[in-house]
Amino acid sequence: MKFTDGYWMMREGVHASYPAEVLDVDAGTGSFTVHAPVQRIRHRGDLLKGPVVTLTCSSPMRDVVGVTVTHFAGVRPPRPEFEVAADPDVDAAVAVDDDAVSLTSGDLTVRVARGDEWRVDFSAGGRRLTGSGFKAMAIIDTDEGRHYVREQLDLGVDHYVYGLGERFGPLVKNGQSVDIWNADGGTASEQAYKNVPFFLTNAGYGVFVDHPGRVSFEVASEAVARAQFSVEGQSMRYYLIYGPTPREILRKYTALTGRPARVPDWSFGLWLSTSFTTSYDEETVTSFIEGMAQRDLPLSVFHFDCFWMREFQWCDFQWDPRVFPDPPGMLRRLKERGLRICVWINPYIGQRSPLFEEGKARGYLLKRPNGDVWQWDKWQPGCAVVDFTNPEAREWYAAKLDALLDMGVDCFKTDFGERIPTDAVFYDGSDPERAHNYYTYLYNQTVFELLRKRRGEGEAVVFARSATAGGQRFPVHWGGDCESTFEAMAESLRGGLSLGMSGFGYWSHDIGGFEGTPDPALFKRWIAFGLLSSHSRLHGSHSYRVPWLFDEESVDVLRHFTRLKMRLMPYLAGAARQAYGEGLPMMRAMVVEFPDDPACTHLERQYMLGDDLLVAPVFSADGQVAYYVPEGVWTHYLTGERVHGGRWVRERHGFDSLPLLVRPGAVIPEGAVDDRPDYDHADGVTLRVYELADGARATTEIPAPSGGGTAASFTTSRDGAAVRVAAEFAGGAGKPWNVLLAGVDSVARVEGGTVDEHPHGTLVRADGPQIAITLEDR
């Protein structure tokens, strides 16, 4: 929201007051409060005037400072609120002198000047990160009687802002106006399904605005040298998080708001959907599954979209008996094929659903101020909304899903949750404006916790469309309704990278696009992108997504990239461990990994998959692609070809290829199984070693299938011409394992293994727990 009319004036009907000086300081243990009049105090008469801004600073954990700006403190405690963690042992030191009051937490300091000029500065590592100065912090009133709190933080010349949820416009948010307000708006506009009031910068810090309702951001847009954020009300709290790197900022932000949960290995396999409005029954479903098997296409999950239930009765959680006369038997037959089952749900109850009267009678649906059930005719005739602020309503909703789990369903696609009304009354008295975005948190939490309770830790997974801050705890999320175009494929990637920079560890999208039917070229290019994403799903709106309906080459391309992903599972499982253990997204914008490379600042058509794989999807039918390679000698994973970095590269790729480059010095564990994701990733693993520098040492851990520990750990080191690899398996039981020295055609000597031929280098098959390789003189 913009308040000013250019640099000098306010917009008509808008009145702003700015803190002018520190009147006094209340210093406590680990926090301080300053009272700042909005005019200079020259004499006692000035003490009779208002307003006074109250600024409180504290620290919930190391390297994080919370700032609360308040005008009137007499408002009722707001509801709902984000769940924000706090470390009770955080050591925050407060210092007060004639010049300033400051609080230091870890390496981060906030300092409020007590001189003639109002100023708040944040510093760390001996440098100023940002701050709030002249006419930056403000309390604002309008002639219509509305009240706002605003803050502006300085942006340096080369400072860039990222995040704010899954946004489909430019990855760099500078110059944009962003409202944190969930909307069902597709992927081609400024609206977003997943709005998160958090941004990170390349300047060493991130900012989380602790307000679950609408937060308006003006990022170098209203004041071009400032990042502005405002909320309606009398108070606003935000947290400034020191990194200094983007990875560290994400670690600390997710420690504050919640880490992504661990998801099961089977969820990383290929998901196939019935699609949305297509006609299907058990015969159709079986034909798809048999068609995949006949064509040697690995499939892990089959998804039933909306019409598994009868029309106009969404949601009643009952299989349509006209097309599914024997749901338990059908699910049993599908599971005998080794498949997991997902079904579509949403949080809305149509008037024709038997659950409508049940929910109405028990008070489980949102109400209007006069006590009527809140309803409208969008999506389903007479549609009502489950009130997840009511604990009994959550139990009621979960019980309906529990019956499906008993039947054989494994997980749920938790669709919708964005169009939550603001003229409704919530059971717990929540402010509707604050509850609008927060609703999705309660919705997905209800479903995810049921799955976790029934399936166990690490076995719960949903496919969610809507989210807000903290929603990363309930994965997985997908990008929503995109069109079947290359432009939509690119906007989807921007959305996924933006979401990853907002604390979400996993992300997916509809391969081929949702709206419309992709032509074969687009479908095949999207397959490569989709199978090199965290999660991979074939889904559409009114057309099927089985590959043989496009062309036979689509079948080959899908087989090629699905099997590649299955072989990469030991590596992907390690990247997933970083997601749930550290809050790092599996798919990362280049600037996350290379914050000191200016060429990576705006890159949004490529990404890092985990620490060491660079992926550049091809956004053209003819295979032309341009991408940037950071410094060093990188290697094409699919061909073994070397690429010298520090430059842009232009290439042409067939449908069975794309730029998939390995970072120099990386050790990529490749699995021995390519037809399923949930296998023993350590059994038969091949460590692919790339450009290991003299003196380098790399540790590669293979997570256990259960996620409860490490199945195997390998240490790879190089000392001159000597390369050594040591293996340690859980429980002490050895398993077959190999080492591939990529780009090395021959070696002088090998101890502890036997040499075999490989098109990408020298393959050594281990005889025991250690291999010693002597390289030939070059």
Image (cartoon, rainbow, N blue to C red):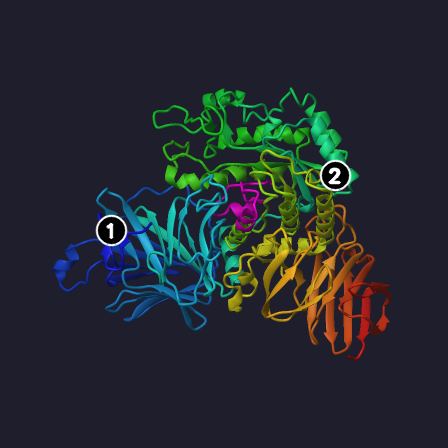
Task: Estimate the x, y position of residue 229 in percent, counting from the top left.
Answer: 36, 53
- Residue 266 lies left or right of residue 426; in this view the side is right
- Residue 43 lies within the magenta run: no
Crowdedness near tag 1: few (<14), some (14–19) or many (≥20) residues, C-alpha within 10 Å: few
Magenta residues, start to end: 462-491
Pick the residue in front: 294 or 303: 294
Q: Residue at x 24, y 54 (%)?
A: 10
What amino acid is found at the position of numbered circle 2 in the picture? Met
- Examine the residues drawn in magenta and state their main secondary structure: loop
Taking the view exactly as shown, the residue that stands out farthest to the front is 622
Q: Is residue 757 placed above or below 747 in the rendered structure?
A: above
Numbered badge on residue 292: 2
Q: Distance from label 1 to label 2 (Cα)?
A: 61 Å
Q: Residue at x 53, y 20 (%)?
A: 354
Is the C-beta separation of discs 1 and 2 under 8 Å?
A: no
Numbered badge on residue 11: 1
Task: Assign a secondary structure to mark 2.
Answer: helix
- In this rendering, does residue 434 appear at all? yes
Task: Estimate the x, y position of residue 544 in percent, counting from the top left.
Answer: 64, 35
What amino acid is found at the position of numbered circle 1 in the picture? Arg
Pick the residue in front: 64 or 271: 271
Task: Estimate the x, y position of residue 412 in percent, counting from the top left.
Answer: 60, 36
